[in-house]
Image: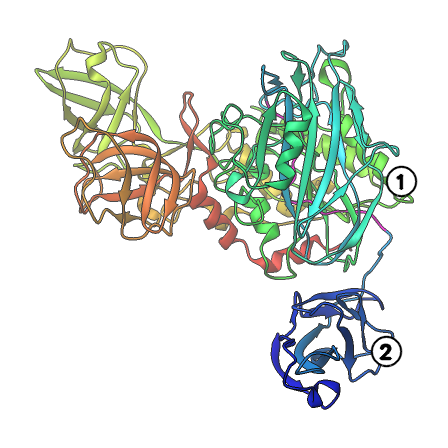
Amino acid sequence: MEIGFTVASGAGAGLGIGSSTLLKALTLSNFTFDNNDEPGVVIGTIGNRTERSTLTVVPNDGRFLINGDNLVVGPSASSAGQITVYVRETLPEAINSPRETRFALVKEDVPPAVDPDRYMFFGSRARMPSGNIVTAAAGTNYVCSKIIISSPQYKTRTFKFHLPGFASTEGGNSPQETIVTGTVGTPGNSVPVDAMFMRVSGVFHQLTFGGSNTATVADQTNGVWTDEKTIPDVAAESDIELWLFYHTAVGEKIWPVYRVQKHRGERIWGANDNASLLGFMADPLADSTAALDTGYGTQSQPQYYGPDAFMVAKGDWDGRPIPLAFVDSIGESRQEYSSAADARGMIGWLRRWLDKDDGIGRIPFCMIGMPGAGSVREYTGTGTSIATRRRDIVREIIAFNGGEWPFTVVANQLGQNDTSTLYNTWFNTNYRSNVNRIRAEYPGVKIVALPPLGRTDTQRTITLTSVGTVATANVATGTTGLQSGQTVSISGAAPSAYNGSYVITVTGENTFTYNFAGGTSPATGTIRANDLGLSAEYHLYTAQNAYPADGTDASGKWRLRDDILSKTSSCCDDAIDTYAAWVSSVKAGAWPGMLELPSTTLTAQSGTDGVVTYNTITVADASIFRPEQQINIYSGPEGLARLSTQTIASISGDVITYQGSSAVILPAGSVVRPSAAFQESSTPISLVHPYPIMIDRIVAGIAQSEKTKLQAA
C-alpha cells in the first residue's frame, strides 16, 4: 500500500514560479510477492507516472528494480515480511521533482515449489463431458462458451487444455462414453474450433493446436490438446477465463460439458458467424444469448461444449495432495447445477469440502466421474459399453508429463450405484472391480475411499377406508413420526378423490384420519402416504439400506461402509467417513428430517387473494439458504401444515425469489423449511441427492483435518 511521499532536493526544488507540472503520488497494482519469485518477476505495475519521467528505487540495493512501468524482484535477497521501499520519480521541469512514493510490500514465506516442471490437475471447477447432446440451431450455430476456472493456492504459469470428442452418458449406464454426434461405431459430425483463448487479469492469451489457431475435433475420439502455453505467473486463487469459439452446421450435434454459471461471469453466446462472437471479447460481461441461456439453476439447463476437466498446469505446486476422484452424481455436484455455485464455481458437497480454505488448504482435483457412474462400468468396456477414453486421456498426460502422474492420490466416492440384492456381488463384483483396475493402472497409488450416503423412503404404504368425507388410513408400519395437524400427501388411491395433500389427525399407533371430498370405500391401489421429508422418524430404510449393518444383504449399504472403514480386501488404503456429518440426530442411518434443519419465518405476507401470483417472499433470515434449494412453507407457529413448496431462484438480502410463481396466501409468521434432499420420483420416493442445506451440513461436519489422509504415504 502507498503510505506516504517525500519531495527530495533536486532540480525541481529550485524551479521557477512559472512551472506548472506537478508529479502525483504513484500507485502500485499489487504489493505482495513470495520467496519463490525469481529476479525479474513483476510485483506490480506502477501507475500515475508522468510522461517522460524516470523512475528509480530507493534504496537502490538490488532487492527491487524498475522495468518499464513495473516494479520487479531484483537479484539481491530480501527477508520475508513487510518491506518498505520508495520509488523516486524524476522530471526536471516538474515543480516537485524528484518525488518519492513510499510503498509497504509484503514478502510471503511460502513452501518451495516441489516440482515446477510437472503438469498437475488444477481446474477444480471443471468437469467431465457428460449429459444430453446439444443440437445447433439456426442463428446460434456459431458459439462462444466462456468458463471461469479459479486457480489453486499456488502460482501457475504453463498450461495445457483438452477438448473432448465424446461425452459420457448419465444414469444407469454411466460412465459409458456413448454420447456422440453419430452412433456408436459410426462417427457423426466433427466440431470445428475457430479459436480458443485464456484471459487472465484482463489480458487475452491465444491458445494453439499443433501451431494452428484452429482445430477440428472428430467424433468418437479422445479429442485434442492445446499446445503448451506459458504466460506471466498467475497468482494464487486467480480467475482464469477460458473462451472457446466453435461452430457446426445447423442441425448438427455438439458434445455436452458445462452449465454456465452466469452469476460468476460465465457466458454462452451464439451467432450466425464467428466474427460476431469475437466482438464479445471487448465486452466480456455482455448478457448471454437468450436462446441459449435457458433453464438456469435447473437440471434442464443445457450443457455447452468447452475444455473438460483434463486441464493441467505447471507452477509452484507445493506438494499438497491432488486427487483423481472417481465419483457419481452425489460426489460430482448434485443436487446443485449452476446458480448455487460459490465464488470459485464449486457445487456439490465433495467439491466444496476439498476446495474449502481450511486444514492443509484448498485441494485441487480432477473429478473423472459424473452422475450415474458405477464402479463396475468404470475404466472398462468397448463398443457400446466403452468407458476407457478418459483413462486413455490420463495416459496421454502421463506421456507428455515425463511419465509422471498429474495427480498424487485417488479419491473413490463410488459405491452408491453398485447396489445389488446380493452384498457379495455389490462389494466384490461391482465395487472392488474398479479398485482393482485403478491399482493395475497406477501401481502403488494410494486410494482414499469415501463411503456413500444412505437412502431413506419418505413414504409408507397404507390402506384407506372412509365414512362420508372422513378417510381413515391404516399404516401397518406405524404412525411414528407423524403429528396431528401436519400435512401428508396421499397418492396411488382409487378413486382419485382420496389423493392429494391433507392435514391429518393421528388417531392411534397405526391410524390417522383426514377430511376429503368423499369416495367409495375401501380405496384400491398401491397407496402411499408421504410426509415430504418432515420427520426422519417417519422414514423407512430403502432396499439394501437397512441400518445397522447386520451381515445380511438387506443392510448392504452399511456393510459397504464397514468394509471401507476396515479396508477389507484392500478396497482402499484409507477412508474419510461421511456418516456423522450426514445422519439424522433422531434416527440412525437416516437422512435428517426438516424438523432437524434450520428454518426461518416470513416477515411479511405474500399473496393477496389466492388468484394473483407472486414470486418473492421476505423472510427473517435468508442466509441459511442459497439458490436451487427447495423450500416448504408451513403455517406458523407450529410449522406442520404445509402451504406451498417452491425452489429458490435467487436471494437478495432476505428476499427470496422463486424459480416459479404462486398465488397461495402465506401469512407473516409462516415457517420456511428447507428440504434435505431431492425426492426421487419413483416408488419408493427416497432421499438421495442432498440439497444445499445438507451440502453445507456435510461440508461443515467432515473435519478438515481429514484432508491429511489424502497425502501420499
The magenta stretch is 118-131
Q: Provide the residue designation for mark 1.
A: 400
Separation of marks 1 and 2 at Cα, in angstroms: 36 Å
Q: For the residue carrying disc 2, how many other residues have a C-alpha within 10 Å: few (<14), some (14-19), or many (20+)?
A: few
Q: Is residue 141 left or right of residue 231?
A: left
1 and 2 marks in contact (CB < 8 Å): no
Q: Secondary structure at mark 1?
A: helix
Residue drawn where x is 76% and y is 60% of the image: 318
Rendered view: 65 above or below 640:
below
Q: Which disc is residue 366 wearing?
A: none
Q: Residue at x 72, y 83 (%)?
A: 98
Find residue 576 and report its horizontal and vertical position in percent. Answer: 61, 50
Towards the viewer: 320 or 284 = 284
* Camera-side residue of 93 and 587: 93
Residue 76 is labelled as 2
Type of the residue with mark 1: Phe
**Residue 549 at least partly seen:** no
